[in-house]
């Protein structure tokens, strides 16, 4: 192994992640899924978001937020089904905090809601970054996590 190879990151020239990085990210995502799922049972949403905003000890090299959102969605999708958007968004928020990316979770409703069904997504710097499918034309109802407090 040459000196250049020893210092190279595990992202190849095509942007492909190494098998070790994929495995590590997948394990962190599953861990955060369990953490979020249990947290939703024991805490209010604002309280859980506050706890997710604290930077976790286990971190990883920065990925583009949109790419990370797709990775989170793929890891948690099983057999064509995945967790609800609120769980998916909270796990994504936690993963963004692992790479020290400030983000907010946003809750919204369609412009003319026919039911009480809300949708959640994550924004970085006011821009929708997912997880897929993202905002879907929803009107913002509440934001959590910007500066550690909620905004409505």
Image: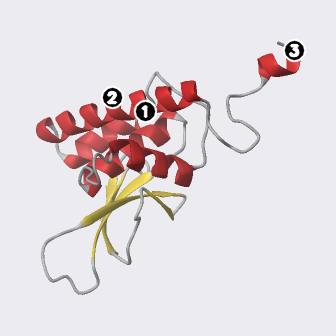
Q: Residue drawn 34% across and 75% down?
A: 138
Q: CA distance from mark 2 to mark 3?
A: 35 Å
Q: Look at discs 2 and 1 and give the one toward the viewer.
A: 1
For mark 3, what is the residue? 2
Residue 57 placement (x, y as % from top left): 46, 21
Where residue 31 is drawn, which disc sits there? 2
Q: Residues within 10 Å of mark 2 (few under 14, many from 20)?
A: few
Q: Residue drawn 35% across and 37% down?
A: 52
- Spot the residue most to the top: 1
Q: Is residue 126 above or below residue 147?
A: below
80 and 9: which is toward the camera: 80
Is mark 2 in CB contact (under 8 Å) with mark 1? Answer: no
139 and 12: which is toward the camera: 12
Residue 102 placement (x, y as % from top left): 51, 46
For mark 1, what is the residue? 26
Residue 130 placement (x, y as % from top left): 44, 59
Q: Residues within 10 Å of mark 3 (few under 14, many from 20)?
A: few
Q: Please state if 11 lies on the left or on the right of 150 as rendered.
A: right
Residue 151 placement (x, y as % from top left): 33, 60
Secondary element at image label 2? helix
Q: Residue drawn 87% across and 15% down?
A: 3
């Amino acid at each position: 192994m040459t000196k250049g190879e020893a210092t190279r990151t595990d992202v190849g020239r095509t942007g492909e992640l190494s098998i070790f990085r994929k495995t590590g990210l997948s394990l962190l995502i599953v861990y955060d899924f369990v953490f979020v799922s249990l947290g939703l049972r024991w805490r209010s949403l604002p309280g859980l978001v506050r706890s997710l905003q604290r930077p976790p000890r286990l971190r990883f090299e920065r990925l583009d937020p949109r790419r990370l959102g797709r990775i989170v969605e793929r890891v948690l999708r099983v057999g064509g089904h995945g967790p609800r958007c609120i769980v998916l968004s909270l796990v994504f928020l936690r993963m963004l905090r692992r790479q020290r990316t400030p983000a907010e979770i946003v809750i919204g409703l369609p412009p003319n809601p026919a039911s009480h069904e809300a949708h959640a997504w994550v924004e970085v710097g006011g821009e929708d970054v997912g997880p897929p499918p993202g905002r879907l034309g929803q009107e913002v109802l509440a934001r959590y996590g910007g500066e550690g407090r909620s905004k409505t």
